[in-house]
Image (cartoon, grey):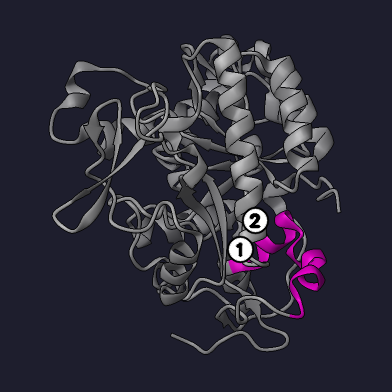
């Protein structure tokens, strides 16, 4: 691993890492089923939700210093934390859902402060009520969050549905980062319960469905300044965008609301690097451009990458493109350069960084839109 951050070197940024705030954990004797429980088993901490232990944790989910220490050992100097997806309040009573979002966003804002310049965070909104979600998004960003994490579908509706337009209009206006993550059981197919297919295959399919729905509905074309980040390298999306182009060419229903070729809208998304396939990751960077791809680890879960920095370095990208993927793109979207002065003068030592050239603006995948900075 290369050395610690030096002047002119940008920190490596992980845009896909999850956290559970301690103040969201259920206290003994309290009856709040939505809250997880921390338990100890065999000398290790276990998180339980709904009475069932979560057996996919392989790293720190709760302690901010622990998260940063693990990230630092992996060569990462700044983390963008997002809620544990199981705690996004889909399916809860609207009043309780709003309260859960408020508590999570307050907890995440505290995590940003506790990170002393090494942490950014995404909040939660009640997307089942899009007008309310738009207000919550503005409040979250006023509290110091960079945007929100949303699931690929809500109540059976995918994100290109017109009901979600108030939220996406607000996200574009605020230049919020919207992180689209599968709901983990969103497809609800019986076969997904076998052989870990719900995570190995169904989750990537759900992400691709959400992205394709946003594109073919015309949402991305009509709102080119949206900043939408897709988890897991877009899921299976890279395998089908040629097919989506073909459908747009030959079927009137596929072009009913989309004027441009689907691939043009698809290149406006941002993608994390979590493909578990370096050849596929290389192809993704080539297709959408290095300005649209950002390092993501999916810590602290077992389906994350234990070596996300090495995954990027192995691509052999030109220096400037490598620097963009490792941290430059994220620094631009999260406005980290504007925040460095806030973190100066104390706190955690400078994070490790990797060499690279100047960060360029949005490439062809950004549709020529301004980054809003």
Q: Nearer the viewer, residue 121 or 42?
A: 42
Q: Is residue 17 visible?
A: yes
What secondary structure is marked by label 1?
Answer: loop
**Residue 84, position as x, y percentages in the image:** 45, 40
Q: What is the quadrant of residue 167 in the picture?
A: top right
Badge 2, how many Cα within 10 Å: few under 14, some, many 20+?
A: many
The residue depicted at 67 percent of the width and 58 percent of the height is 113
Q: Is residue 102 left or right of residue 46?
A: right
Q: Residue furthest front?
A: 29
| Quarter the C terminus occupies | bottom right
Residue 2 drawn above or below residue 19? below
Q: What is the quadrant of residue 228 in the picture?
A: top right
**Residue topped by disc 2:** 112
Q: Is residue 249 visible?
A: no
Q: What is the span of residues highlighted in magenta in the rendered image?
A: 327-345
Residue 230 drawn above or below residue 29? below
**Residue topped by disc 1:** 115
Q: Is residue 36 left or right of residue 289?
A: left
- Residues at discs 1 and 2 in contact (Cβ within 8 Å): yes
| Quarter the N terminus occupies | bottom left
How far apart are the two marked residues, 1 and 2, measured between alpha carbons?
Answer: 5 Å
């Amino acid at each position: 691993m290369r050395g610690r951050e030096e002047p002119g070197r940008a920190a490596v940024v992980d845009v896909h890492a999850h956290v559970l705030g301690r103040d969201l954990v259920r206290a003994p004797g309290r009856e709040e089923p939505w809250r997880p429980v921390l338990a100890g088993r065999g000398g290790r901490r276990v998180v339980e939700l709904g009475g069932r232990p979560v057996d996919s944790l392989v790293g720190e989910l709760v302690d901010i210093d622990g998260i940063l220490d693990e990230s630092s050992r992996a060569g990462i100097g700044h983390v963008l934390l997002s809620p544990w997806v199981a705690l996004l309040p889909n399916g809860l009573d609207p009043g309780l859902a709003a309260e859960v979002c408020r508590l999570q966003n307050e907890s995440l804002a505290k995590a940003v402060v506790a990170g002393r310049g090494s942490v950014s965070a995404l909040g939660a909104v009640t997307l089942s009520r899009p007008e309310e979600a738009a207000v919550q998004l503005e409040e979250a960003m006023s509290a110091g969050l960079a945007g929100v994490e949303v699931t690929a579908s809500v109540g059976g509706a995918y994100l290109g549905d017109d009901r979600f337009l108030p939220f996406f209009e607000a996200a574009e206006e605020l230049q919020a980062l919207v992180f689209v993550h599968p709901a983990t059981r969103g497809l609800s197919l019986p076969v997904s319960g076998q052989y870990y297919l719900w995570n190995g295959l169904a989750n990537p399919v759900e992400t691709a469905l959400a992205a394709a729905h946003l594109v073919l509905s015309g949402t991305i074309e009509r709102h080119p300044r949206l900043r939408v980040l897709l988890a897991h390298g877009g899921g299976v999306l890279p395998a089908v965008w040629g097919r989506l182009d073909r459908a747009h060419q030959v079927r009137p229903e596929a072009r009913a609301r989309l004027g441009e070729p689907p691939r043009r809208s698809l290149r406006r998304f941002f993608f994390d690097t979590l493909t578990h396939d370096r050849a596929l990751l290389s192809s993704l960077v080539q297709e959408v451009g290095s300005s649209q791809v950002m390092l993501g680890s999916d810590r602290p879960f077992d389906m994350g990458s234990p070596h996300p920095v090495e995954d990027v370095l192995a691509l052999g990208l030109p220096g400037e493109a490598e620097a963009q993927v490792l941290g430059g793109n994220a620094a631009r979207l999260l406005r980290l350069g504007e925040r460095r002065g806030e973190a100066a003068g104390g706190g955690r030592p400078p994070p490790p960084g990797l060499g690279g050239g100047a960060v360029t603006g949005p490439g062809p995948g950004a549709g020529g839109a301004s980054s809003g900075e």
